Each structure stands twice: as C-alpha cells, then as structure tokens.
Image (cartoon, rainbow, N blue to C red):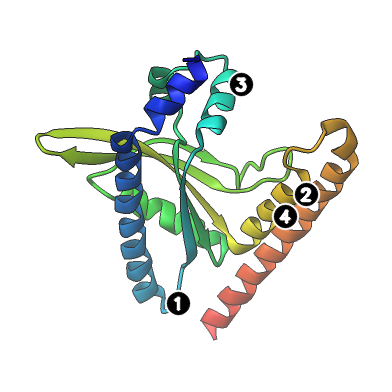
Amino acid sequence: MSIEEELKEQIEAPMVRLKYAFAMDVMQAKLRMMNADLTEQKSRQVIRNMSARIKTTDSIIKKLIRKGRKVCFKEAVGELNDIAGIRVVCYFCDDIYEVAEKIREQRDLRVIKEKDYVKNPKKSGYQSVHLIVGVPVTYLDKTEEVRVEIQIRSFAMDYWAELDTQMCYKKDAGQIENVEREIKAYSDVIAGVDNQMLELRRRIEKM
C-alpha cells in the first residue's frame, strides 16, 4: 500500500469522518442560533446561507506537499486547520464582524486563529474573514477538540470568489495571468458596490 493509499484509508475511516461531520453540525447549529439572535436584534436577516464540506483526500495530500509536510495521517490531522470547513455568507460586509464576534463569545468554543482578508485582501482580490475554531466532540467518556475553519464573507465577496474559482481554478498560470489581473480589478469594483450598499442600508435605517 502506498503512502497516499494509507492516508486515504485512515482519513476516510467512518469514525474520523463522523468526528469532523459532528463538529461541523455543532458549529452550524450555533451559527443558526447566532443568526436568529442577530435577526431579532436588527429586524433583518444577517446570514444569507451556509455551506459545509470535508476536504477531499487528494486536496489534503496536495496541501501537505505544498506545506513541505510528510504525507501521513498524523501530519494531516495535526497540521491542517481546514479539513472541516464552513462558509458563511452574510448580506452586508459589516455583518461579517458581527458573526465573528458572536463566535468569539461562545464559551464552549476556542478560537485558535484568525485571518482578516477583508481589511487586508489577498493579492488576487480575495476577501473573507477566516476563523479556526476548536469544537469539543464528546463520545462515551472521551472529549476531543476538532478544528473547523469558518470563512465569513459578504454576498458580494462570495459572488466574486465563486467567479474567480470558475474562471481561474486549475488553469495554467502563464496562460491566465492577464485574466487574473482583470478579475483583481473587478474585485475592487465589487468591493466598492459592497460598501455603497452598506451605506445605503445605514441611511435607510436612520429614516
């Protein structure tokens, strides 16, 4: 059995998959409660939608290689923070920080790491707030902390990211350099519209 096949067998074992799925279920239930709380406070929906996924074994292997790590189960679960991932799409860009703050306030969760790509976008134009959260998973007499990556972005940011993925993902870098430059310019336009819609909403709220 090759190293890749061994990792695949271990990472796709039912109990391992179920631990990550359980952690995501807990986190999504909490996010639904946060949305209900914020909706009551603001008299409007804050979270538009959510999606969750467990990283494929092929993606895990590629990321371990890219990070210069040994391709094995121990390195995968010990070093990678995004095996379990949840994407939260909000209506407005200020809602992102409201949701992030609600996550920080959860006493039974541990925020391990944060990255703010809204205030400091990636060179590609990508914007989102990323939180790595430790979620306690209890089975019988054992409790284990399972890490879940939560990406929080606005509807406009999600629109740009989806189009960027569709047009640039897995394309040859040399062939697509000009396209990436143009897409980056569009991200600035979309961010401008995002901020304008936020200002419009605030004006309406003051009426």
Specify whether 163 is left or right of 11.
right
Badge 4 is on which residue?
163
**What's under tag 1, amino acid-wise?**
Arg
- Viewport quadrant of the C terminus: bottom right
Pinpoint residue 16: horizontal percent, then vertical percent: 32, 34
Question: Left or right of 119: which side holds 166?
Answer: right
Answer few, some or many: residues within 10 Å of disc 1's Cα (few below 14, many 20 plus, some between 14 and 19): few
The amino acid on which the numbered mark 3 sits, given as a three-letter code, is Arg
Disc 3 to disc 1, C-alpha distance: 42 Å
**Element carrying mark 2:** helix
Q: How far apart are the two marked residues, 4 and 2, measured between alpha carbons?
A: 6 Å
In what element is the residue under mark 4? helix
**Marks 2 and 1: in contact by CB < 8 Å?**
no
**Residue bearing mark 1:** 44
Q: Which residue is mark 3?
A: 66
Mark 4: few/some/many CA within 10 Å (<14, 14-19, 20+):
few
| Mark seen at residue 30 | none
Q: Earlier in the sequence, mark 1 or mark 2?
A: 1
Residue type at mark 2? Answer: Met
